[in-house]
Amino acid sequence: MNSTTEKLLKMVSDWTGTFTDAFSIRENGQCAGRRSTPNVRIEDKAGLPGLDIHVLPGTRGERLSIPACVTHGDVDDLVYNDFYVGEGADITIIAGCGVHTENGEPARHNGIHRFFLGKGARVRYVEKHVGTGKGSGIRSIDPVTEAELEEGAVLEMDTTQLGGVDRTLRNTKAKLGPGARLYIRERLLTEGDQQARTDFEVELNGDDSGVDLVSRSVAKGNSRQEYRSRIIGNARCTGHSECDAIIADKGVVAAAPELVANHGDAALIHEAAIGKIAGEQLLKLRTLGLTEEEAEAKIVSGFLK
C-alpha cells in the first residue's frame, strides 16, 4: 500500500497499521490485502469486480473492515459487494471510503453494497467518506446500499461525510419482513461548490416492522444538497423520517420527505427543518471568547455529532 492509502485508512476505518478481524482493503480498484476468519468468509465475486461475504449463522462479536481508497486522479472505481448474514448472527461492518487527487484528473469510487440478513440477524454498518488532495480534479463518492431483512433482523446504518467530496449521489433501498428494524443516521457536510443528493426508499412489508431515519446536514459556501426519503407501509408497521439541515453563506438544501400508507395500521411520520445558525447561539459563544468562525465551527460540530 502507498502512503496516501495509509492516511485514508486511518481517516475512514479503524485501521491502526493492521486489522485484528476479517478485512479486505481495496486500493485503486485492486485488492491490497484480505483475511477471512472461520466465521466470516470473503470470496471474489464471479463475473464482477467485488466480493461475496458470508457471515455464518450464530456469529457473535466479530468485526469486518472493507475500506476502499482511490489515491490519484483518473481512477473510476466500481465495486459490487454482497453480504450474506446468517440467522442469529451479530456483526459490525466498517466500510469507509476515501478519494484523493492532486491534479486536474477526477477520482471516483462507486460502491454497490447489498445486504441479505437472515432471521434474527443484527448488523451495525459504519460508513465514513472523505475526499483529500489539493488538485482541481473532481472527487466523487457514489454509494448504493440495498438491504433485505428477514423476520426479526436489525440493520443499524451510521453514515458520515464531513468534507472534501465534491460530488456524491447516495442511494439506499431496503425491504423489511415481519418484526424487522432499520435504523439510519446520516451526517453530511458540504462546502464550496460541492453537491450532494441523498435518496432513501424503504418498504415495510411485514407486520411490526419499522424504520427510523434521521439525516443531519450542513450546507456552506455555494454548496447544494438534495434530500429525498420515501417510506412505504404495506403492513402493520411504524416509520419515521427526520431531516434537519443548517444553511450558511449561500448554501442550498432541498428536502422532499414522502410517506405512502397502503395499510390501515401503517403509522408513518416525517419531519423536516431547514434554517440558519441562530444568532443567539453565535452571540453566546462569542461572549465566551470565541471568534465568529470558531463559534460557527463549534455549533456545526455539535449539530453533526
Image: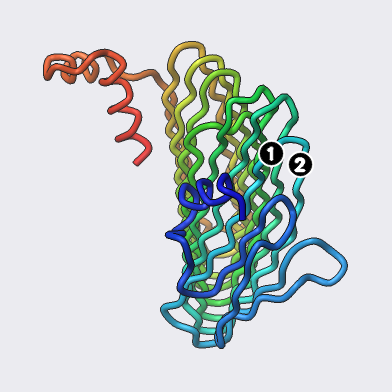
Quarter of the image with the C terminus in it: top left
Closer to the camera, 54 or 229?
54
Q: Secondary structure at mark 2?
A: strand
Q: Tell me the tag on residue 75.
A: 2
Q: Residue furthest front?
A: 2
Q: How many marks?
A: 2
Question: What x and y, as percent, mark residue 88?
Answer: 50, 83
Q: Which residue is mark 1?
A: 72
Residue shown at 51%/65% (left/top)? 93
- Does residue 87 lie above or below 45 as drawn? below
Quarter of the image with the N terminus in it: bottom right
- The answer to which quarter of the image holds residue 100 is top right
Check contact, mark 1 vs mark 2: CB within 8 A: yes
Task: Please say whether residue 223 is visible from this viewpoint.
Answer: yes
Closer to the camera, 173 or 264?
173
Residue shown at 38%/18% (left/top)? 276
Q: Residue furthest right?
A: 47
Closer to the observer: label 1 or label 2? Answer: 1
- Does residue 237 lie above or below 216 as drawn? below
Q: Tell me the tag on residue 113.
A: none
Task: Please say whether residue 118 is visible from this viewpoint.
Answer: no
Question: What x and y, as percent, mark residue 194?
Answer: 60, 24
Neighbours of disc 1 within 10 Å: few (<14), some (14-19), many (20+)? many
Q: Secondary structure at mark 1?
A: loop
